[in-house]
Amino acid sequence: MSKEEIEFIGKQVKDMYGTYIGKVIGTITDIDGSVQTVGVDCGSDGLKQIPFEQLVVQGAFVIFIPRWRLDAQRLLREKGLTLRRIRALIDIVSENDDMKEDAELIHEKYKMKLLTLDETEKQIKDKLEQRLADLDNQLKSIRMLRFDAKLQNKSNEITDAKYESVKTHTVEIIEHIEHEKAEIANIQRRITDLSVENLERAQSPKDVHSAAVSYLGKVETPPTSQPNTPVTAGEGVGNNTPPSSAPKPVAIGADGAEDTQDSDWLKRISSS
């Protein structure tokens, strides 16, 4: 094991929003010595084996990264790259029609990749919706607990200090939940942006060359020959309107690149 992998053992584990999860007590390794899972003592929830890729050492703590976040980021990277390559393919064909046949072969490859990513996207969207539903249920439970504490305080069952303690902790948990909901909403928006671009491409002509015409507007139709008619002096001078310019290429918006906001959780963890 590497030094970084050994550093996991004995450290406290927190999620990306500062909530404690448990303590690392050991690892399970493969035959080549690489870490497969990390054993985390989660108290009453028992020992949990967490995949190594979902944990990151950050100072004195180990940070747990939820699976939905890793899957969503991977989807954004792969789909963004696939769309950029399709765009580059269209650009190449629009500039050199002789490469049309070669480009069509590669186009089929990326079209199949998009179909696979679309299925993955559907699964991730379902996971995100389920996670949002879970978070909403947690919010209801926390608010009910806080209200009941207020009721107990008003009926002199608990002191003001105890009520303030409950209030402080519940506010902190609510902030964590709202942070996670905001990140999920951001990822959903980015996935939707890529889906819109994909839909536009699906509605374009099937032929790659036609797609180049549709997206870039660079291919011009050859001018038809016109009979030369004599023009008398002064006739039609100043009445000729210049031809309209060809439409400019349309740039792709979302590209699946990492958002700078995605690193905010590291700052939150460091300051917590």
Image (cartoon, rainbow, N blue to C red):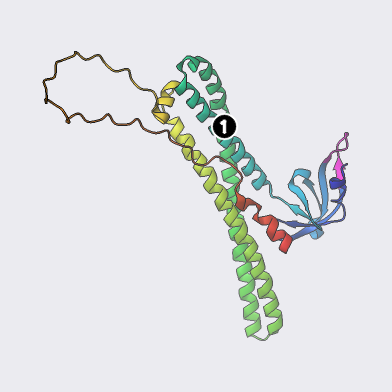
Q: Is residue 112 above or below residue 101?
A: below
Q: Position of residue 91 (x, y in %)?
A: 48, 26
Residue 158 seen in the figure: no
* Magenta stretch bounds: 27-35
Residues 73 and 30: in front is: 73
Residues 125 and 178: in front is: 178
Q: Is residue 65 magenta?
A: no
* Quadrant including the N terminus: top right
Quadrant for residue 210, please give it: top left
Residue drawn 67% across the image and 79% down it: 164
Q: Where is residue 27 in the image (x, y as percent from the top left)?
A: 86, 46
- Residue farthest toward the front in the current orientation of the protein: 233
> Which residue has dot 1 on it?
82
Q: What element carries label 1?
A: helix
Position of residue 200 in the picture relative to residue 268 (left or right) = left
Q: Is residue 28 magenta?
A: yes
Residue 5 seen in the figure: yes
